[in-house]
Amino acid sequence: MVAASANLANLRSTSLFSNRPLSISMLSGIRNSFMLPFRNCLKPTPLRLASWPPHGSSVVRAMSSSSSFGSTLEESVKSTVAENPVVVYSKSWCSYSSEVKNLFKSLQVKPLVVELDELGPEGSQLQNVLERLTGQYTVPNVFIGGKHIGGCSDTLQLYNRGELEPMIAEASGKTGQT
């Protein structure tokens, strides 16, 4: 460790505009003076390749600010999942989420879709709550009949085994919805 830090302290490069060597402290000053302003300007923006959801589907794009902390947000997730036969927590740009949404569309099922990337900071808080509740951080995060079934591959496996449609039918019967 000491040898590595000694080597790092001796690291030098040549400046583009002179023959004067650059030291780590000079590079640090450059980073501080140039990179921070750029960091503020380069905020990622969502890339929209296609419009989702298809006409007639339910999508949650915003949630009330009262459910933005801890147990209140957890209770919101639990009640959303309990009150809707099929719920998909998704990100609009995620190909796996799109695959699950398209599967449900082909089955003529209209899930409640919660696009986490369109909720601002609350979306990441909600994703953390989902991880705490399900052990799964990734999207899509799919619930049927109040039960967490997993992600894209889990949903496709249920479909391929012929278990998904009966599960949806049972869940829709409980809530009276499709």
Image: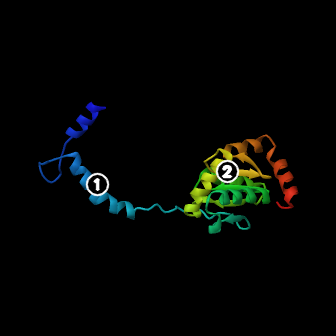
Circles 1, 2 touching at the beta carbon (< 8 Å): no
Horizontally, residue 20 falls left or right of residue 85, namely left
Label 1 secondary element = helix
What quarter of the picture does the N terminus occupy?
top left
Instruction: Give the residue type at disc 2.
Output: Asn
Q: Residue at x 38, y 63 (%)?
A: 40
Q: Position of residue 145 (x, y in %)?
A: 80, 52
Is residue 156 at all visible to an observer of this figure?
Answer: yes
Residue positioned most to the left:
19
* Amino acid tagged 1: Arg
Q: Residue at x 73, y 56 (%)?
A: 78
- Write the residue at 23% across / 35% down: 6
Task: Name the residue beneath numbered marker 2.
Answer: 141
Q: Position of residue 175 (x, y in %)?
A: 85, 59
Q: Residues within 10 Å of mark 2 (few under 14, many from 20)?
A: many
Quadrant of the image occupied by residue 101: bottom right
* Label 1 Cα neighbours within 10 Å, binned few <14 / some 14-19 / many ≥20: few
Q: Which colour assignment does the render follow?
A: rainbow
Q: Nearer the viewer, mark 1 or mark 2?
A: 1
Mark with earlier residue (1, 2):
1
Q: Which residue is the site of mark 1?
A: 31
Q: Is residue 60 above or below residue 16?
A: below
Toward the viewer: 98 or 149? 149
Q: Residue farthest to the front?
A: 71
| Rendering coords of residue 112 (x, y %) | 72, 60
> How far apart are the alpha carbons under marks 1 and 2?
39 Å
Is 64 above or below relative to 78? below
- Taking the image as shown, residue 11 lies to the left or right of residue 150, namely left
The image's mark for residue 108 is none
